[in-house]
Amino acid sequence: MAGAEVALSARAKVSRWLEEAIASGSIPRGGEIPSERELAKSLGVAKNTVSAAIEEAVRRGLVVIREGSRKRYAGTPGGASLASSTVFVLAGQMSFTNVDTAPAWSDAFLALDVVRSLSKLGRSVGLYTPQSLPSGGLDAIFEARPGGMVVTNSVSGDPLAMEALRRCREAGIPAVAYGNAPELRVYDRAYSDHRAGSRDIVRWLIAHGRKRIVPFFPFVPTRFGERERIAGYEEAMREAGLEPVAVSVFGSKAIDVGDKAEAFRIQTALAMAALQSLKRDGAFPDALLCLNDDWAKRALAAIHNLGLVPNQDIVVAGYDNIVRENQPDADFPFRPAVTVDKHNERSSEDLAALVLARMDGTLPPEPQARIHQHEVVEILQRNSP
């Protein structure tokens, strides 16, 4: 009897560990359970004890076995099946893994915040990137037949993301995308209006006395959101009776020398050359509209290196509110005068709500769009070296 009690206690230990690991997110919903050998070693119990505990967890629905696979995965509370309840989130490359430390403007934050929003609502979630897909790629994901899918990476021109959305549509799996490119409009989607954001920031520049405003991009804008920014710029200029000008391209996507400081130096030199080419009758433009706050740094450095005062001689507008404070970095004393905050946290909430509503059958049959309001953020600190 004593031996049976010890065995039962050891099995209870494993069961409790599984419950706590899944509840805390240490093993995310849909995530793979460690092997029986690994668990036996880490928990200090026999391998057959782990097997018994996992078999019990499978019966309870806490752990599930995917069809055609011997691997075990974290299920959902109450025994709901993985296939009917799990939402898979397909993200781009993830430079951050913690939603609380990922910058709010980043694609990583958007994906991680979708996961957090869904988890708070009691849904199991599987987060994948192109690098972390199972060995079978998308085939392995669709063999599991998720209850829904959210694609958060920049899908315009991304073959993997578009393929995932297409397969969801063919299989009748609810799918929600981030963005508003034409090819996404057959899906539910949430997005920030880049055209309106650019239009508002150009209106701000005009209201502050700037007339010769030049889009100043590191490369030719080709993605849908980038083209929308240019369209918003042109609308605001014409609205004010001003003539839009072509995008001034000062860099290249190909510049990658490995050393960030050296790359910055090269990009700044290219920005200086581009600014020199924009002089008309000896005068520079009085404002630059940059792709985002990070690329605006090259423009600001170029202005300073040309002997001009950033945001006085030439006002620089950024985008994305990458640095959410008015104080400059210790190693870089300049900031754009104005930027736009897309408020990714609102998009993540919309993406999570849309996929759940579609899974629950509470949305109209036609694709739904959720557009959230951006915010023009004035920084306006005096830039000085």
Image (tube, rainbow, N blue to C red):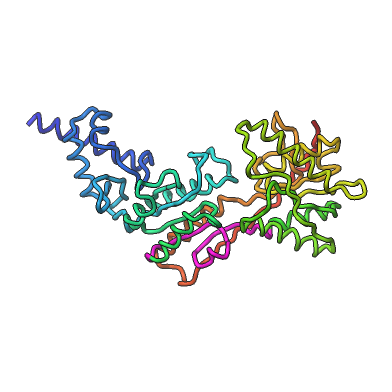
Spot occupied by residue 368 in the image (x, y as percentages of width and height) = 51, 67
The residue drawn where x is 32% and y is 55% is: 144
Lateral position of residue 218 relative to residue 165, left or right = right
Report if residue 154 lies within the magenta region: no
Lateral position of residue 18 relative to residue 170, left or right = left
Q: Nearer the viewer, residue 58 or 68?
A: 68
The residue drawn where x is 20% and y is 49% is: 59
> In this picture, is 225 found above or below 133?
below
Spot occupied by residue 252 in the image (x, y as percentages of width and height) = 67, 44
Q: Nearer the viewer, residue 138 or 232?
A: 138
Report if residue 191 lies within the magenta region: yes
> In this picture, is 101 found above or below 80?
above
Which residue lies most toward the bottom here? 365
Count of labels in the image: 0
Quadrant location of the C terminus in the rendered image:
top right
Lateral position of residue 282 relative to residue 356, left or right = right
Spot occupied by residue 72 in the image (x, y as percentages of width and height) = 27, 45
Q: Which residues are magenta?
A: 171-196
Which residue lies most toward the right here? 281
The residue drawn where x is 50% and y is 42% is: 94
The residue drawn where x is 69% and y is 57% is: 229
Lateral position of residue 149 relative to residue 80, left or right = right
Spot occupied by residue 217 in the image (x, y as percentages of width and height) = 71, 49
Q: Nearer the viewer, residue 166 or 84?
A: 166
Quadrant location of the N terminus in the rendered image:
top left
